């Protein structure tokens, strides 16, 4: 019997504002789960700029606070919907994705309230699974529920979540980004899989297809389970945030 490889979780986020906007309407937050693991929340508020940022912040804070208290992902998503719909009278919407690594069940849980699909590539052959079941944004319609997918944690598992700035990149110029094909090509051409490099490459390609002027806020999240690169048990997180 072959030994089970020691694994590590990598989470990478790359995001830019819509062209000529001072602030992104997308919000990304990460929280440790009380029973082990991590949850990541990605929210895209309606419209762009400061008004969209206010909406996405409201949703992200509500979802993160509930997840930190041990509320399950689906319940947290529904509560965030109810809160936004009540607060704004059903007049504004937001897309919401929650990706959780649950160490108790050793599963990866993906909760979608977004028209954008989630791309999953797994195994050495980069087998593709596209989570594209119809899903409603939160905040406007009653009884809105997330679409939830649960996957076992295993080596060479890559989950790519993005906002519609990626999905529509290049549309005005007649060339859209094929996220699954591009991601698979990048993974196959790299000697060492790195979530940071994949997120950066996807963002750069989306901006390139918009001719350097993003037509919407663009956010890319990559969650990868790969063989552990370092022998220690240290948990690490790094952030790079331009300030001027």
Image (cartoon, rainbow, N blue to C red):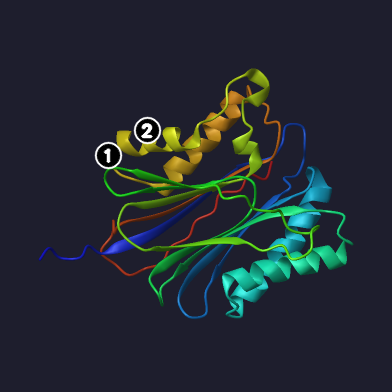
Q: Nearer the viewer, residue 118 or 64?
A: 118
- Between residues 66 and 238, which one lies in front from this camera angle? 66
Give the image quarter of residue 138: bottom right
Image-quadrant location for residue 183: top left
The label on residue 122 is none
> Residue 191 got which mark?
1
Residue 126 locus on image (x, y percent): 33, 43
SS state under label 2: helix
Residue at the top extreme, as displayed: 173
How many tags in the picture? 2
Query: Which residue sits at x=74%, y=47%?
Result: 25
Establish if 91 lies above or below 119.
below
Q: Secondary structure at mark 1?
A: loop
- Residue found farthest to the left: 1
- Measured as percent of width and height from the top left, residue 213 is found at 68, 27
Q: Nearer the viewer, residue 46 or 199?
A: 46
Q: What residue is at 54 percent from the left and 30 percent from the top?
A: 177
**Image location of residue 225, percent across then percent down:** 36, 57
Q: Quadrant of residue 2?
A: bottom left
Camera-nearest label, 1 or 2: 2
Q: Quarter of the image containing the N terminus? A: bottom left
Q: Is the residue 41 above or below the residue 18 in the image?
A: below
Q: Residue 129 placed where, x, y %?
A: 42, 47
Asked if the residues shown at circle 1 and circle 2 are in contact, with their CB atoms under 8 angstroms apart, the answer is no
Inter-mark Cα distance, 1 to 2 = 12 Å
Point out the image quarter for the C terminus: top right
Q: Residues within 10 Å of mark 1 (few under 14, many from 20)?
A: few
Side (left or right) of 147 relative to 84? left
Q: Residue at x 78, y 48 (%)?
A: 46
24 vs 13, left or right, is right
Earlier-in-chain disc, 1 versus 2: 2
Q: Which residue is mark 2?
A: 185
């Amino acid at each position: 019997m072959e030994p089970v490889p020691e694994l590590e979780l990598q989470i990478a986020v790359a995001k830019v504002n819509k062209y000529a906007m001072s602030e992104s309407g997308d919000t990304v937050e990460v929280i440790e789960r009380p029973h082990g693991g991590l949850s990541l929340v990605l929210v895209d508020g309606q419209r762009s700029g400061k008004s969209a940022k206010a909406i996405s912040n409201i949703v992200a804070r509500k979802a993160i606070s509930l997840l930190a208290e041990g509320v399950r992902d689906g319940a947290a998503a529904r509560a965030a919907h109810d809160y936004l719909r009540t607060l704004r009278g059903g007049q504004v919407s937001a897309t919401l994705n929650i990706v959780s690594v649950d160490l108790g069940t050793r599963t990866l849980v993906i909760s979608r309230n977004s028209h954008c699909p989630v791309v999953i590539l797994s195994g050495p052959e980069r087998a593709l699974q596209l989570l594209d079941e119809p899903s409603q944004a939160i905040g406007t319609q009653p009884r809105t529920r997330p679409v939830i997918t649960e996957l076992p944690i295993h080596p060479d598992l890559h989950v790519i979540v993005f906002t519609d700035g990626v999905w529509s990149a290049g549309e005005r110029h007649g060339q859209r980004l094929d996220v699954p094909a591009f991601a698979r090509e990048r993974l196959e051409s790299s000697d060492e899989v790195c979530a940071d490099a994949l997120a950066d490459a996807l963002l750069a390609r989306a901006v390139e297809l918009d001719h350097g002027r993003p037509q919407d806020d663009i956010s890319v999240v990559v969650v990868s389970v790969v063989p552990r690169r370092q022998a220690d048990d240290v948990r690490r997180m790094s952030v790079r945030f331009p300030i001027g």
